[in-house]
Amino acid sequence: MPIIILEGQRISLIPEQCATDESIVNTLLPFYPDVANATISRKVVDGEEHIEIVKKVGTKGNFELIKSLQTAPESINGALSLSWKLKQLEIQGKLTLETLLNISEEIELAIAQGEQATKATNSALANLIASPPIPSKHPIPNF
């Protein structure tokens, strides 16, 4: 029975799965996406067929996802800005109930902005998790 050697692991496959390079790739692809572009070499060791799979090094990434992250506006969460402002007032001894009442609209706005930012962050995280690994034609700077 042929032995697949992939990333230091020995994987046993039935002879039909190892008949061609294409059948090996089709068998392993759901579990090891990088085999799609890997180099496959065969040799016989002690009467046993060893099939070595070596992943190709290359640029990776989902260009559209990377582009959306790069073009996303930079901002400071309004809730953080307000918390810093309140801390400064507290340090100065000016944080009173009257002060809080005077900035109640600002507090409500910061809460709304914070909730919106949380939703946007959760959405971006869900997109990152759901994005499949795909080869990129463009190198990613600073990686």
Image (cartoon, grey):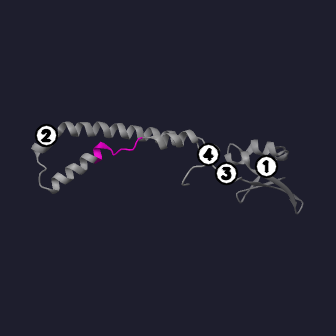
Q: Mark 4 points at which residue?
A: 138
Q: How crowded is mark 4: few (under 14 residues within 10 Å), some or many (20 or more)?
A: few
Q: Label 4: state its secondary structure.
A: loop
Q: Disc 1 vs disc 2: which is toward the camera?
A: 2
Q: Mark 2 points at which residue?
A: 102
Q: Name the residue under label 3.
A: 58
Q: Disc 1 vs disc 3: which is toward the camera?
A: 3
- First in sequence: mark 1 or mark 3? 1
- First in sequence: mark 3 or mark 4? 3
Please identify the residue farthest to the bottom as the structure is shown.
46
Q: How crowded is mark 1: few (under 14 residues within 10 Å), some or many (20 or more)?
A: some
Question: Which label is found at residue 13?
Answer: 1
Q: Distance between the residues labelled 1 and 3?
A: 27 Å
Residue bounds of the magenta highlight? 73-80
Q: Label 2: state its secondary structure.
A: helix
Q: Where is residue 100 in the image (x, y as percent from the top left)?
A: 15, 43
What's the amino acid at mark 2?
A: Asn
Q: Position of residue 37 (x, y in %)?
A: 73, 47
Q: Could you tell whether 9 is left or right of 44 in the image?
A: left
Q: Where is residue 63 in the image (x, y as percent from the top left)?
A: 58, 41
